[in-house]
Amino acid sequence: MNKAYTTVLTIAGSDSSGGAGIQADIKTFAALECFGLSVITALTAQNSTGVNAIYPLDETCIREQFRSISMDIAIDAVKIGMLGSAAAIKTVSALLRELKGNPPVILDTVLASTGGTPLLPPDAIPLMKKEIFPLASLITPNLPEAALLTGMKHPPGTQKAIESAATHLLETGTAAVLVKGGHRDGNECRDCLLYDNRFFWYSSAKIMTGNTHGTGCTLSSAIAAFMARGETTDSAVAKAKVYIDDALQAGASYRFGNGNGPLHHFHRFWL
């Protein structure tokens, strides 16, 4: 009767189509045997073809959601996705400092949607680096995001350039950096983790599918779930990579809307 759930709190935007954002996070937590909690930062009207509208929530709404949860429920890990505004960044930064127990914080540096819609104003990026990065146990930029965050003219393409970007980002104060390589051309996906003064490379065959909506949200949520369950950062990334590759493969055969469909978060349970 005293058994406790392993909990993961997601702070992110809502995706009305269910493929990314809060909805993808909750599905991922559940699939990996964690109980999902949520603080919504923005509502979006979107479907498989793109984002049609964004409605940011104000700081009071974000703050009340967070405090209602944290005053009552133990939080084992935090995943942060779309913040959407400078005001939300400041609010979330202050709230993270209130958390008890120092749970791991995984920040998915969401700057744009899969279809290219901006989800964070460019002038808010330096503030996110200043306020949120030093509080993060891990940040998970993809290659285009790594370029924007480091001031590179082009997304890093070589192993040396990717490791250089990761090193630069580590200097912002975050504990670890995962540069995701899914945007590279070719048949291989190579992700680079800089953690504990070491580079870890994770390679897998690129899964050719049109259903990739929510991939970044899902990967960072899977890492958060595994870290909530006690895995080290490198082990959590390795296990999350297996989960997301299987979810992409399982979702490839499904038809969903008229555009970019989602992964299959519950592939382990459906027949």
Image: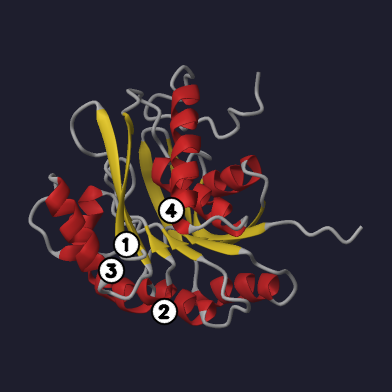
- Indicate which disc, 4 or 3, sits on the residue closer to the N terminus: 3
Q: Amino acid at mark 1?
A: Leu
Give the colour scheme shown: secondary structure
- Indicate which disc, 2 or 1, sits on the residue closer to the N terminus: 2
Closer to viewer: mark 3 or mark 1: 3
Percent x, y of residue 253 = 46, 17
Taking 75 as reference, is 188 left or right? Answer: left
Q: Quadrant of residue 137?
A: bottom left
Closer to viewer: mark 2 or mark 3: 3
- Tell me whether the residue at label 3 lies in contact with that at label 1, contact meaning CB atoms closer than 8 angstroms: no
Q: Residues within 10 Å of mark 2 (few under 14, many from 20)?
A: some
SS assignment at label 2: helix
Q: What whole-number distance in Å separates the C-alpha atoms at marks 2 and 1? A: 13 Å
Q: What whole-number distance in Å separates the C-alpha atoms at marks 2 and 4? A: 29 Å
Look at mark 2 in the image and give the residue it sits on. 90
Q: Which residue lies at the image location 38% right of the left edge and 30% below the top edge?
A: 260
Look at mark 1 in the image and give the residue it sits on. 120
Marker disc for residue 234: 4
- Indicate which disc, 2 or 3, sits on the residue closer to the N terminus: 2
SS assignment at label 4: helix
Percent x, y of residue 165 = 19, 59
Q: Amino acid at mark 3?
A: Leu
State which quarter of the image contains the C terminus: top right
Look at mark 3 in the image and give the residue it sits on. 170
